[in-house]
Image: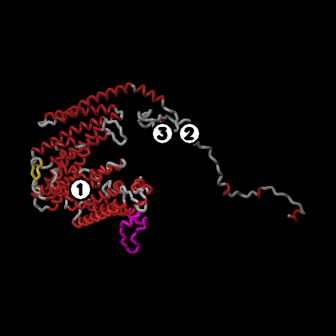
Amino acid sequence: MAKQKETSAMEIDDQSSLPSDQISNPKFSVNVLQLLKSAQMQHGLRFGDYARYRRYCTARLRRLYKSLKFTHGRLKYTKRSISITTVTEVRFLHVVLYTAERAWSHAMEKKTLPDGPNARQRSYLIGRLRKAVKWASLFQELCSIKGDSRTSLEAEAYAAYMKGSLLFEQDQNWDVALKCFKSARAVYEELGKYGDLENQVLCRERVEELEPSIRYCLHKIGESNLQTSELVSIGEMEGPALDLFKAKLEAAMAEARSQQAASMTEFYWLGNRFPISNAKTRVSILKAQELEKDIHGSAADSLPAEKKLVLYDKIFAAYHEARSCIRNDLVTAANSENVKDELSGLDKAIGAILGQRTIERNQLLVKIAKSKLNKVRDDKNEKVTKPEELVRLYDLLLQNTADLSDLVSSGRDRKMEEVALAEECELKSMVFRAERCFYLAKSYSSAGKRTEAYALYSRARSLADAALMKLQSANAADQVMIKELRTLYNESRSNSCVEHAKGIMEEEKAPENLSKKISNISLSGTDKKMEKLLMEKLDTYESAVGEANMKVVPRIETFPPAFQPVPRNPIVLDLAYNLIEFPSLDARMKKDKKGFISRFWG
């Protein structure tokens, strides 16, 4: 498939359709966007692995040089440049294109380092981008002469994008960078109106990837009224062309947080104030608080659940980074008890907030699972939730509330806010226990165990009733939780009645079913995958007719019975006969009388 796409991208115009004066100089056709997109998605950029894509470009160039016999010498390097006269086939254009891609991917590899590029790496990054611009400009120049009109336009857009990326990274000439990005966008908008459907989709995607960079350039010039939050939402788009923009946006946001964190000297939690002296701790806490605004803000209801889960992961990462800085400060702190107490209190506060956010995230997972519980599977890829999965999630929630309650309850002098949070954890634990019991009953019901399901539904109803009474007696009662508990109480009651009725019906039909099953018992069978026979497990307390979900018929005993070995009569062997020495009997034997003559012949 990839070879077919690559072959289609390297098509040469049919020479028979050219005028006679152009047969000697054919126009090459290269679908630049389709070729590069296919190579990028198949060799690393689907997952942001620029190192893998750079290795692919290097290997691709090696194959092209070898097939074109355009090598640079074996023992001594001899530079061979590509010019207009050199390009005699389309593969020479591919050499220039993949050389530009190799330089660009090397620069992006440095840009996407975990800790960001240092000063030396950044200088190298700029150099590689300059090299990419140089080869992209050469590619544009060659395609303008050797390529057809569409190839020339795509090469122009590619060179404009590379030049804009270089200026974008250098933080200078924003008006020129804006002009380059707009030029590339205009070309792709025009090309997206023609060609096959796949090409049109690729061009529209490229236009969408260029749009954030254009808006950011307008923002830097001052011709746009974009807010920081809008820039963040733009940065959430995906695509290789957006990686430079994301890195630039992250750097700008980090700088803004550092400036804002300079005025943040204390952290407030449940009536306590903890001073923050470490700048990294302040920045991490500030980053987490900004993300929390997106989750708990006015626009939180419109956010999809998958996006909320991603935000929760970022919040956890920011708070864990803050706790790491706090614990490093605890290790390096002096013998001052006051400093250690303040750092320990701050660590406890961050841990409590992490516990609260973990409970919120798991409640969101419960909400997603409940929405898929009774859904019919229309798509093969869509997973339907089982009651056991909800039981597991409520186990996690019970553990989370217990950990948070233990953390808040630790310490000698507790304030009223901490006591209120511990009581809230206890109330949530009662609600979670009732919900867990309800879905555990559902799992037993789906397994056909009516007695256990009835008992668990009754238990869930009593737990929901107790939690409802305690919640109604609280001062600040949560109306949403009260409504959910009432629904749970009613469902538990109705389901317990249903299970009771089904149990009675099954008990009435039990003799009939038992006689039917006994009549189906097989005396023999040849299935080797069968379990033990009835006669082989008389000492175990198992059903003689098998379980309800068994597809095979139980067997009593094999018939006809198998042959059994029988002992035969013993064989007597006289082993001592050859070893007995019998006495001589010559003296008792009768001697023959001989005549006179026979003596001479004896």
Judged from the image, the secondary structure of the residue bearing numbered disc 2 is loop
Question: What stretch of residues is rendered in magenta?
Answer: 60-88
Q: Residue at x 23, y 45 (%)?
A: 361
Identified by mark 2, the residue type is Ala
Front of the two marks 1 and 2: 1
Question: Along the line of sight, which residue is nearer the eye, 562 or 487?
Answer: 487
Residue 478, quarter of picture:
top left
Residue 303 position in % (x across, y down): 22, 43
Disc 1 to disc 2, C-alpha distance: 80 Å
Residue 76 in the magenta stretch? The answer is yes
Residue indicated by mark 2: 562
Q: Residue at x 66, y 57 (%)?
A: 579
Question: Along the line of sight, which residue is nearer the eye, 356 or 469?
Answer: 356
Disc 1 to disc 3, C-alpha distance: 64 Å
Residue 50, quarter of picture:
bottom left
Q: Residue at x 37, y 41 (%)?
A: 380
Residue 196 position in % (x across, y down): 37, 48
Residue indicated by mark 3: 530
Identified by mark 1, the residue type is Phe
Q: Mark 2 or mark 1, which is nearer the start of the sequence?
A: 1
* Residue contact at pointers 1 and 3, CB within 8 angstroms: no
Judged from the image, the secondary structure of the residue bearing numbered disc 3 is loop
